Image (cartoon, rainbow, N blue to C red):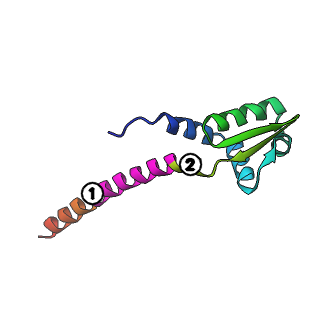
Amino acid sequence: MTKHHPELSLLFHALADPTRRSILTRLAERPARVTDLSEPTGLRLPTVMRHLSVLEEAGLIVTAKDGRVRTCAIVPDALEPARTWLDEQRSIWEGRLDRLDALAMKALKERKQ
């Protein structure tokens, strides 16, 4: 059984919301002000700030404040723990499917004989 990784729970929770994913897509292009991020969503600023705090808590973005302007930037390597976990899961399931395929092929050969 794999170990429980609290950071994975935060990452997947943050990625579960389409608004947060669209914010990350926008930030992948370049850093942006909070007001610029809120405009395309049609959401009120406090709601967008809550989404940003979830992303920041998960380590997906960082924010900096200069006067009254808060700017957000994506953290490029933040998805690495999720990628690693998904690769591990893929390897486990590919092994299981390979064994199932071998079992099915063996049963098919035995049936033909």
Give the residue type that dot 1 points to: Leu
- Left or right: residue 67 versus residue 102 is right
Query: Does residue 47 sit above or below 101 in this rendering?
Result: above
- Left or right: residue 55 versus residue 48 is left
Q: Main secondary structure of the magenta part?
A: helix
Q: Residue at x 63, y 34 (%)?
A: 57
Dot in front, 1 or 2: 2
Q: Nearer the viewer, residue 16 or 50?
A: 50
The local crowd at label 1, few if under 14, some if 14 to 19, many if 20 or more residues have their Cα within 10 Å, is: few
- Residue carrying label 1: 100
Q: Residue at x 63, y 43 (%)?
A: 60
- Residue carrying label 2: 79
Number of on-image labels? 2
Q: CA distance from mark 1 to mark 2?
A: 31 Å
The outermost residue toward the right is: 68
Name the quadrant of the N terminus.
top left
Kindly check if marks 1 and 2 are in contact, taking CB atoms under 8 A apart as contact: no
Which residues are drawn in magenta? 81-98
Name the quadrant of the C terminus.
bottom left
The outermost residue toward the left is: 113
Give the residue type that dot 2 points to: Leu
* Residue 35, quarter of the rendered image: top right
* Residue 72, quarter of the rendered image: top right
Mark closest to the chain's N terminus, 1 or 2: 2
Q: Residue at x 88, y 35 (%)?
A: 67
Q: Provide residue 76's location: percent of width, then percent of height.
A: 62, 52
- Left or right: residue 80 versus residue 19 is left
Q: Provide residue 80's location: percent of width, then percent of height.
A: 52, 50
Q: Residue at x 23, y 63 (%)?
A: 102
Q: Nearer the viewer, residue 77 or 50?
A: 77
